Amino acid sequence: MKNKILSIIAVATLMTTATSCIKEIEPQTSYATVGQVANAPGAFQNAVDAITATLTGQFVYSPSDEYLYDLGIPAFYLERDIMGQDIVYPYQNWYTYWYTAQYLGPSYRFAQLPWTYYYKWIKSCNEVISMAGDEPTEKQKNGAGIAYAMRAYFYMDLARMYCQKPYAVDKNDVTVPIVSEKTSVSDLTSNPRATNQEIWDFIISDLDKAEEYLANYKRSDILTPDQSVVYGLKARAYLEMEDWANAEKYAKLAQNGYTIMTADQYTDWETGFNTPNGAWMLGMQYKSDDPQILRNDADSSWGSLMCIEINPKVSGCGYAANYGQPFCIDRHLYETIPATDCRKKCYIDFDIDNLPSDAAKVEALAAYSNHPDWLLTTGKAVGSKGYCGVGGLPLKFRTAGGEAGRDNQYVGFVVAVPMMRVEEMYLIEAEAAGMQDEARGKQLLEKFAKTRDANYEYGTHGSEAYYNGSTGQFRNEVWWQRRVELWGEGFATFDIKRLQKGIIRSYAGTNHTDQYQWNVQTTPEWMNWCIVQTETNYNTACTNNPDPKAPEGNSAPYAW
């Protein structure tokens, strides 16, 4: 895991990824040029399909199936979320480095992962945009719109991962180099990191084009973006930029045609967060013939990491279910969720750990699953490693395929994963409205919160001192809702950086892993990702973020 990436192969991979993003002049060669490929039958649609083909299900970082963080977009959800406080990683293995803030510097493989993935995805978008040209034909407009929307999505992630200060704090802080369809080969060796202002202007420009080109697009599923998703991406962008009027406007537009999940849908034992419903705006879908499903006993998939209902006697697979390596909820966050809030049912009660016998625990676990004995087995697998047992285990992301899926991971791990839900749009609308008129924002927030907890009362979650108060009680209330609603969906560090928060892992009764129980007053520096060293070696204009240094030992417990 600690091997340096500086090798001929790594350098070649990086330069291939970078140079292939360019629209090149057609030479006299024996192979097909960009222009020739573009004119081949079906080539344009094939290129459009390729944009989302590797978001999940494929091994992109390495042809080997041994790296459990080679998962595409879902892996980045986890990497970002466990850098904070809301997800606990009790047994240190595949995702240790993001949880412990170690080996994240520019000369390690973990810095290569996002560079390999995101710029490959951007390359796919650039190819479509290049093929369509500045004036796409009517047949090409929808494909070009998808490319512009997804390129904005990818750069939005990169901007938030690599900036040290968010847009609203410092518009001149730097993010990542922009590689577009118009970037020349010579530009690549002297391509500086774009400022916040430059990259968010670029993102908005892409979204403006996507909004235009997708105006009449009717998609058959949620695996590609349509105009509503563009509105959602604009809402995210304007939220980050603190352009409150536009954030509210586009969040409201994005809601059209979607419905907030009911409490029953949110906690459904069969379809909970594995099957798209009327709230999902954009998503990914594992397929039964994906390499991540067929190889390595399907253990290199999102389901292996997040779905804990897999029969230990029939399948026996799954890192979360049977190998003692689930991603658990932070105990304090769990304890702040009222018993009347439906979302609390997605995590096992810590009080079950105190029951006097296995029989009593199984009886209590029957409130969460048709197979409570399996949950106890999962808890014991964690406990056997010397960490917490049952309390905090997640059941938000359910195994797919009913009983057949629970007995067979090749069915159970063929799940969908959300990328955008309408609930996020309601929370953006509330925050943006409240920053213009707090009373109106409070009203919108209460309306949303009561879909999860009919007894919700404003003011419960916004006044604790550790929130470091500059954002005020209202935004703290919105942040708490986002933390609970969007748990495990990749938003945690983005919000911590955007709101300039610290983290609290050390407190009485914490379930965070010993030696990593940290309390940090300001936004942790390890949330500012490092650019892989091969990029800065060959791109002389590209600077880097400091190699993060992890705190040493546990912090003194925080008193809530």
Image (tube, helix red, strand yellow):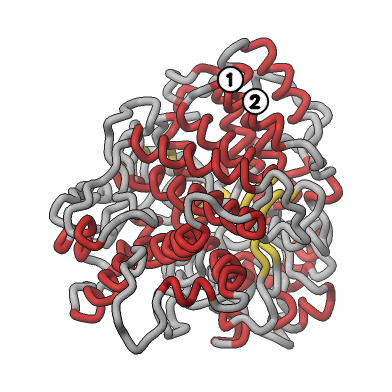
Gap between marks 2 and 1 measured at Cα = 6 Å
Disc 2 designates what residue? 249
* Left or right: 380 in relation to 349: left
> Is 59 in front, or is 42?
42
* Left or right: 142 in relation to 553: right
Image location (x, y in percent) of residue 180: 37, 54
**At 73% from the left edge and 88% from the top edge, which residue is drawn?**
314
Disc 1 designates what residue? 245
Task: Tell me, yes or no, whether the two marked residues, 2 and 1, touch with CB atoms within 8 Å.
Answer: yes
* Left or right: 125 in relation to 261: left
Label 1: element kind: helix
Instruction: Please give the count of numbered marks on the rendered protein.
Output: 2
Label 2: element kind: helix
**At 83% from the left edge and 64% from the top edge, which residue is drawn?**
270
**At 62% from the left edge and 47% from the top edge, which residue is drawn?**
213
For mark 1, does the 10 Å Cα neighbourhood hold few (<14), some (14 to 19), or many (20 or more) residues? some
**What's the residue type where badge 2 is placed?**
Lys
For mark 2, does the 10 Å Cα neighbourhood hold few (<14), some (14 to 19), or many (20 or more) residues? some
**At 78% from the left edge and 49% from the top edge, which residue is drawn?**
266
**Residue 447 visible to an observer of this rendering:** yes
Q: Which mark is residue 212?
A: none
Residue 389 vs 453, above or below: the answer is below
Image location (x, y in percent) of residue 90: 49, 61
Q: Quadrant of residue 202?
A: top left
Image location (x, y in percent) of residue 340: 80, 36
* Left or right: 16 in relation to 6: right
Image location (x, y in percent) of residue 322: 61, 76
Q: Quadrant of residue 406?
A: bottom right
Residue 103 vs 229, above or below: the answer is below
